[in-house]
Amino acid sequence: DAGITQSPRHKVTETGTPVTLRCHQTENHRYMYWYRQDPGHGLRLIHYSYGVKDTDKGEVSDGYSVSRSKTEDFLLTLESATSSQTSVYFCAISDGSGSGNQPQHFGDGTRLSIL
Amino acid sequence: GQNIDQPTEMTATEGAIVQINCTYQTSGFNGLFWYQQHAGEAPTFLSYNVLDGLEEKGRFSSFLSRSKGYSYLLLKELQMKDSASYLCAVRTGGSYIPTFGRGTSLIVHP
């Protein structure tokens, strides 16, 4: 299994508080991604990174920011959490530039509840 | 953008064969992935197709027709542990990031 660790695995917090989720990899893969998964919507890309300090927005980036100061760590921050951000968050990693069959490998997810 | 369609739910009997379809509308197709996701767990990679035809991997096979914008995942000799969601993801040439369909929940019953 790919070495991906997400922390925390579960979190309950209140509306308006800041939340940071961490993704740590030991595979030295260049690409890292944050997804959220909600019933009826499948996996939706929030932000992704193609190298240290290189990040870009996905389709549902509003209300989220990311940082990648080291190859192995990709942080997702909710500056002021809202109830609509209650979801399961998955981190993924991949190697290669998009050609070939390099799949994404996913972490175990973080279940975030915002009350 | 991309439009990826999968059936929401399917049921099948243990020991049988099931085919899960995925249709997509996209430009610059550059690969299709299938993932399996058990409830409460992470998606795991099953197969990849970029050329037309069938890719076989044990009990699982995946087929692609680029001209029809169509793929299917074929599961043979179904086992109870195959009950899971199956996610189709399509990648276009302009991006290395695949877009996921909403997934098909497969229920295998005795």
Image (cartoon, grey):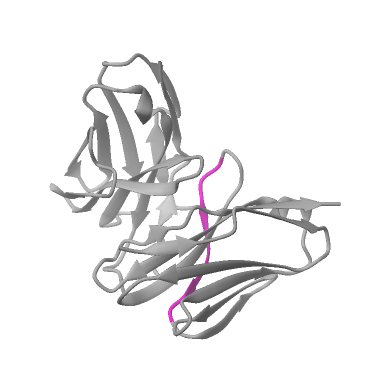
Q: Which residues are magenta?
A: B41-50
B26 displayed left or right of B54: left
- The reply to whether the magenta stretch includes residue B83 is no
The quadrant the C terminus of chain A occupies is top left
Q: Is residue A77 toward the left or the right of residue A44 in the image?
A: left
> Which residue shows up at 51% across the image and 40% down it?
A39
Residue A104 image position (x, y, % from top left): 40, 58
Q: How many marks?
A: 0
Q: Position of residue B17 (x, y in %)?
A: 76, 68
Q: Is B44 placed above or below A85 here?
A: below
- Quarter assignment of residue B55: bottom right
Residue at x 33%, y 41% (from the top left corner): A24
In x, y percent, where is residue B51? Answer: 45, 84
Q: Residue at x 83, y 58 (%)?
A: B14
Tell me which secondary structure the magenta stretch mostly adopts: strand
Instruction: Evaluate whether residue A11 shows in this view.
Output: yes
